[in-house]
Amino acid sequence: MKFQLYLPLLIIFFALNARSQTLPAARSLDKTDTWTRKDLIQPAELASILNKPQAKKPIVLNIGVAEDIFTAKKIGAASNAGNLEKLKATLEKLPASSFVVIYCGCCPFEKCPNIRPAFNLMKSMGFTNGRLLNLPVNLHQNWISPGYPMAAGK
């Protein structure tokens, strides 16, 4: 009889635990983050676009300290006020409808000091097609290890 009373509680506990374990990449989408899933671009999707000669290429901006992926322009760590201004100056030269992808890749999203200021700046400037490259762990694990294209010599 006691088991029947505790069974619903056990089911709820295991369901909540399983849910939290199936969403590690979404963990960074908590209340402190201003992006949504539609603001993210997956590494495989970006790599596919970059590898297709006829595809319309996004403007890829490295707003961190990690290595440059193929076609990326190095801005530098957006946690630095000077680099954030450099990002702003770069974005000011573009139409707000431009396909722009920013990324850092230095560390897991929840610890990254660069993606939030850069993403928030891009959105505050009205970029409607701005995306954040989904590198929830780091550039090495989420981009380099799968063999996605890096800048020449990397």
Image (tube, rainbow, N blue to C red):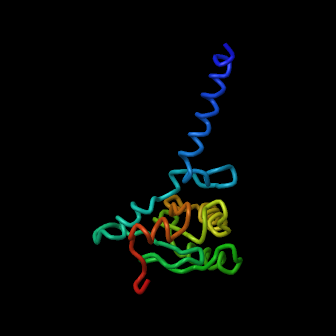
Camera-side residue of 127 and 13 = 13
Evaluate whether residue 116 shows in this view. Answer: yes
**Farthest residue in the top direction?**
1
Say which quadrant the C terminus sits in.
bottom left
Identity of the residue drawn at 69% across and 81% down:
82
From the viewer's perspective, tell me whether residue 48 is left or right of residue 131. Answer: left
Q: Residue at point 48% right, 62% down?
A: 97
- Residue 22 pos. (x, y %): 53, 45
Return the residue found at the far bottom.
153
Q: Is residue 134 left or right of residue 45?
A: right
Left or right placement of residue 22 versus residue 46 in this view: right
User: Is residue 131 at all visible to an observer of this figure?
Assistant: no
Question: Is 76 situated above or below 24?
Answer: below
- Above/below status of 117 relative to 152: above
Q: Name which residue lies at 50% across and 51% down.
A: 38
Camera-nearest residue between 72 and 68: 68
Q: How many marks?
A: 0
Q: Which residue shows up at 64% across the image and 16% down it?
A: 4
Q: Tell me the quarter of the picture where residue 112 sits.
A: bottom right
Q: Quadrant of the N terminus?
A: top right
Residue 100 position within the rendered picture, expressed as x and y whole percent measured from the top left: 49, 67
Query: Residue 75's x, y, as percent?
Result: 57, 79
Is 82 placed above or below 26 here?
Answer: below
Q: Position of residue 27 (x, y in %)?
A: 60, 51
